[in-house]
Amino acid sequence: MSLRRLRLATQFLTRFPVPAVEHFTADELSRSAAWFPVIGLGIGLCVSAVLVVGGHWNVTIAAALALLTWVWVTGALHLDGLADLTDALAAAHRDPQRFLAVLADPHAGVFGVVSIVLALILKMVGLTQLSGQTLLALALVPAWARLGPLAWSRWLRPLKSGQGERFAWHLHGGWIACWTVILLVASVLLAPVLAIAPLGIAAWGWWLHRRVGGVTGDCLGAGVEIVEVLLLIALALAGAGPLLLGALGPLWKLGA
């Protein structure tokens, strides 16, 4: 993996100020996807830092600022994919041509807007529940989510020319296995609940195969959002576990 491809992946996925790669080939764009989990880790660290610093004053405001950072750093790239996919599914009525036509429409419909709002609400709720070690483990959530496009574009057929097709061209399966092992080890050390990530990634791929029949760039973006929400809520619930047990303890004693 070259630093040029790291810069290319960074400028594609984020607003991080890196020296721009002005001229690149489709081959380079495809191979740059091997850096996606690293970019996700950087995004997660930024969000965690805002949450930690802001948490010294007010947890809710810190969560709101962290969410704003998350959206700004990514340029709402994947939220756009989620909205487009939701609109297309709502309007297509299982007509493949209608699905692709709505997917290509740049305008957001009601279903798309609702999907964005719900995703942001769930993320906001999840961020307010993190504390201690889960704040550090939060960095793994975007990293896991950006491993998803590597797998989906590798294993699912592209429905049209575009991002979903480009990333599958020269992406070696070894990178998927390598990142899976690295992220699993990190998850076991920091937050074992995040080890469910491969199941979430596989489930989204299976759903795309059964419901859509393949993958597009919007499907990749939507999957990133879905996996992020799933893992963030799981992390929040795991962190809240001891608190819930502590709160229910007196009730159990009363019942006894």
Image: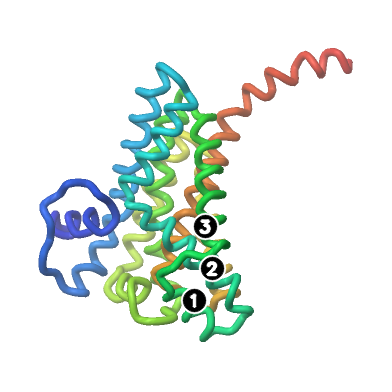
Crowd tier of the residue under label 1, counting other residues whose Cα lies within 10 Å: few below 14, some 14–19, many 20 or above: many
Amino acid type, mark 1: Val
Q: CA distance from mark 1 to mark 3?
A: 14 Å
Residue 98, relative to residue 81: is it above or below? Answer: below
The residue located at (50%, 53%) in the rendering is: 116
Q: Residues within 10 Å of mark 3 (few under 14, many from 20)?
A: some
Residue where numbered disc 2 is placed: 87
Residue drawn at point x = 51 percent, y = 42 percent = 123
Residue 144 screen position, x and y as percent: 42, 50
Please name the residue shown 57% across and 62% down the image. 111
**201 lies above or below 139:** below
**Res. 50 image quadrant:** top left
**Mark 2 is on which residue type?**
Asp
95 above or below 228?
A: below
* x and y, in percent, of residue 206 in the image: 56, 68
Q: Earlier in the sequence, mark 3 or mark 2?
A: 2
Q: Position of residue 43 (x, y in %)?
A: 32, 43
Q: Quadrant of residue 216?
A: bottom left
Mark number displayed over residue 113: 3
For badge 3, the amino acid type reads Val
Question: Is disc 1 placed on a helix, strand or loop?
Answer: helix
Identify the mark nearer the N-term, 1 or 3.
1
The N terminus lies in which quarter of the figure?
Answer: bottom left
Label 1: which residue? 102
